[in-house]
Image (cartoon, rainbow, N blue to C red):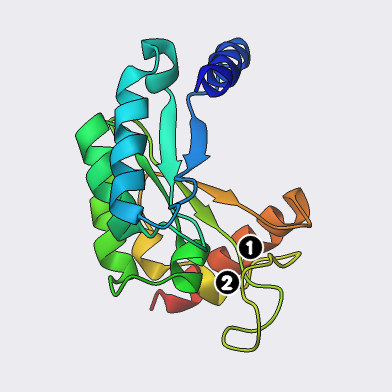
Amino acid sequence: MRQSTAELLYQAEVAQYVNADVINLHGGGAYGDKPAALKRLADVIRRLPEKVRARLTLENDDRVYTPRDLLPVCREVGAPLVYDVHHHRCLTDGRTVAEITAEALDTWLREPLFHLSSPLVAWGEGDNRPHHDFVDPSDFPPEWLGLDLTVDVEAKAKELAVLKLKEQITRRSAAAVP
């Protein structure tokens, strides 16, 4: 824990220098007992220095922790949930995008940050965890349209992927207006 705390303190210092307000973490391993691991996570977060906790966010992942798993921890320790819709589609928890979006928004006291990406292979055709170079506009949740939030596009083509997605969503929205 000492090395992890030192690393998080370093990240908080760098975040302060670059005016970043988020240090984002995945929940980590479950180690054969997910409820116990989530309890340990909450306990560790509570013991972190305030300069780390003030920026700390938790993100659902595609292997272990769903939004349903992390949202109680987020509420308990006051850490916002960075909702990764791609991860949620890979590791579903029976909750809808609309439900998780609303619950995740409620964990934020500042502008929310969500993650978006598309799978390298089509949904349902193999391993959907690896990210594509671009984002398929159909993967952008309609529930997010009109929300005041930052969407981090996780795509191999970086800024080009963001510009292409923005153009596609703008075109789709304009076509929907009568």
* Left or right of residue 36, residue 92 in this image: right
Q: Quadrant of residue 65?
A: bottom left
Q: Can residue 106 be seen in the rendering of this structure? A: no
Observer-nearest of 143 and 71: 71
What is the number of the mark on residue 112?
none
State the SS at label 2: helix
**Label 1 to label 2, Cα distance in Å?**
6 Å
Indicate whether 31 appears above or below 141.
above
Q: Can residue 43 be seen in the rendering of this structure? A: yes
- Contact check, label 1 and label 2, Cβ < 8 Å: yes
Please give the residue where the numbered disc 1 appears in the rendered image: 165
Indicate whether 123 appears above or below 149.
below
- Residue 95 placement (x, y as % from top left): 28, 70
Query: How many labels sit on residues?
Result: 2
Q: Residues within 10 Å of mark 2 (few under 14, many from 20)?
A: some
Please give the residue where the numbered disc 2 appears in the rendered image: 137
- Residue 167 placement (x, y as % from top left): 64, 62
* Residue drawn at 43 percent across, 24 percent down: 55
- Residue 162 placement (x, y as % from top left): 67, 54
State the SS at label 1: helix
Q: The residue under label 2 is which amino acid type?
A: Pro
Q: The residue under label 1 is which amino acid type?
A: Leu
Indicate whether 22 appears above or below 121.
above
